[in-house]
Image: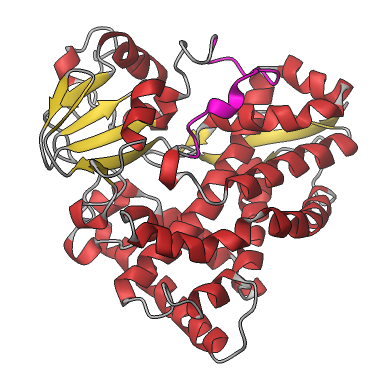
């Protein structure tokens, strides 16, 4: 099988046909860049015949990813065909969620959630985000090593989720636990862990069912649980659909933003001149945010399934074929982002990044994620904080969530 790398395997020497970029090793070791660089150069549409997830197509350049996203009626997101990750979530493990639905059902459920992320709600939440960010930063030590991931990134995003759900504050770290298990496609595949993962998701659903019952008995309010409970499209979902939509909102609202917050620190450590540009001119912060998200790309991929025989740039694809769009690669496409590996806070086209997807499935919470990162930078600069990475990061070992388990840092004053 072409999945676990051998000691002598490199991106340059492995036969092209054997390359399998779902291998968790290349993410755990942060060595994914040359593998995708080779695919973009030699086979931007690449077929892997043998992997732990079955055969699949890899789409690795920017234009082809957009082409797939722009044809949702051909390239389906539906859970009926396995969902939106490279692992087939079928049968007992099928996560029914609106991101894993096609039109019109996708739009009906998405519209229930969208008002929570509209311009007026974002403006309303900004004050709360700033207050919580300032409060947390004021507790951080200077000149003492600590883990940025757990202390800052996880805590800030978990607090935000708790507010969006009006979730019991004392239990908010349950959201972190459920997010970690829900977003882990390796755990979903592994026979030793998939039942443990499923039990965590059942615990999550049972907990939220109690909240649904409470909110349904009350007049509608603005939190996400109330919006879902009182809506026609989501008020009477089946158990697996409740589970699927909850984990979608939790992973989407937690893992993605928290890994961008961690990636931000790692990127500025590697490119300290870019941080100094922000120190000198705070007006550059809004332009820096999409570049940070592009550089990190907190979800490596999304998957589609062909619902009919089709063709993409001369490649014949069959009905039922699995098509994996590698956002992590599209965001390093040199034809769109020159010197793509470099963090450049003045990059003029950073907003063309694919980290939030493209088309009808573009991330509904994108603006909130940007707001949280922007405010974090603003409040750090207000306190004259410069963060220095003091040890090797520990990365998530999987091909879906692209992130950090630990990032040891020290804060210094500039």
- Residue 370, position as x, y percentages in the image: 66, 42
Which residue is more in the foreground, 101 or 208? 101
Q: Is residue 295 visible?
A: no
Main SS category, magenta section = loop
- Residue 267, position as x, y percentages in the image: 63, 25
Which residue is more in the foreground, 78 or 258? 78
Q: Could you tell whether 134 is left or right of 64 in the image?
A: right
How many numbered discs? 0
In the rendered image, the quadrant that contains the N terminus is: top left
- Residue 137, position as x, y percentages in the image: 80, 47
Q: Could you tell whether 352 is left or right of 64 in the image?
A: right
Quarter of the image where one finds residue 128? bottom right
| Image point (49%, 87%), residue name | 213
Q: Could you tell whether 204 is left or right of 290 in the image?
A: left
- Residue 377, position as x, y percentages in the image: 77, 37
Q: Is residue 262 visible?
A: yes
Q: Could you tell whether 25 is left or right of 6 in the image?
A: right
Asked if the magenta segment contains residue 194, the reply would be: no
Q: Which residues are magenta?
A: 339-356
Residue 13, compared with residue 349, is above or below; it is above
Quarter of the image where one finds residue 124? bottom right
| Image point (36%, 36%), residue name | 69
In the rendered image, the quadrant that contains the C terminus is: top right
Residue 178, compared with residue 215, is above or below; it is above
| Image point (49%, 73%), residue name | 228
Asked if the magenta segment contains residue 349, the reply would be: yes
Which residue is more in the foreground, 203 or 361? 361
């Amino acid at each position: 099988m072409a999945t676990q790398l051998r000691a002598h395997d490199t991106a340059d020497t492995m036969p092209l046909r054997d390359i399998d970029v779902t291998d968790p090793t290349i993410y755990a070791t942060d060595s994914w860049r040359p593998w995708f660089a080779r695919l973009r150069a030699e086979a931007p549409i690449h077929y892997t015949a043998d992997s732990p997830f079955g055969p699949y197509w890899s789409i690795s350049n920017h234009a082809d990813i957009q082409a797939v996203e722009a044809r949702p009626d051909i390239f389906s997101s539906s859970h009926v065909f396995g969902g939106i990750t490279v692992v087939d979530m079928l049968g007992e493990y099928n996560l029914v969620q609106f991101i894993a639905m096609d039109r019109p059902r996708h739009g009906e459920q998405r519209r229930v959630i969208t008002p929570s992320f509209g311009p007026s709600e974002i403006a309303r939440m900004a004050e709360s985000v700033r207050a919580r960010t300032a409060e947390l930063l004021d507790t951080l030590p200077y000149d003492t090593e600590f883990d940025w991931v757990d202390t800052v990134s996880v805590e800030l995003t978990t607090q935000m989720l708790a507010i969006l759900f009006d979730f019991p504050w004392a239990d908010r770290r349950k959201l972190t636990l459920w997010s970690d298990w829900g977003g882990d496609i390796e755990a979903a595949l592994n026979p030793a862990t998939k039942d443990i993962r499923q039990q965590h998701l059942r615990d999550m659903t049972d907990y939220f069912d109690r909240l649904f019952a409470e909110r349904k008995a009350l007049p509608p309010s603005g939190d996400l649980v109330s919006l879902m409970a009182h809506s026609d499209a989501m008020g009477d979902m089946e158990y697996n659909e409740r589970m699927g939509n909850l984990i979608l909102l939790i992973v989407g609202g937690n893992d993605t933003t928290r890994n961008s917050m961690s990636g931000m620190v790692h990127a500025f450590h590697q490119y300290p001149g870019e941080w100094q540009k922000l120190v000198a001119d705070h007006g550059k912060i809004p332009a820096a945010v999409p570049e940070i998200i592009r550089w990190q790309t907190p979800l490596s991929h999304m998957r589609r399934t062909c619902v009919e025989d089709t063709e993409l740039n001369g490649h014949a694809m069959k009905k039922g074929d699995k098509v994996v769009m590698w956002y992590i690669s599209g965001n390093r496409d040199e034809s769109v982002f020159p010197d793509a590996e470099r963090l450049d806070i003045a990059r003029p086209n950073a907003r063309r990044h694919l980290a939030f997807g493209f088309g009808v499935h573009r991330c509904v919470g994108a603006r909130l994620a940007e707001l949280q990162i922007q405010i974090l930078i603003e409040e750090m600069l207000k306190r004259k904080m410069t963060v220095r990475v003091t040890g090797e990061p520990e990365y998530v070992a999987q091909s879906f969530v692209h992130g950090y388990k630990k990032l040891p840092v020290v804060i210094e004053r500039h």
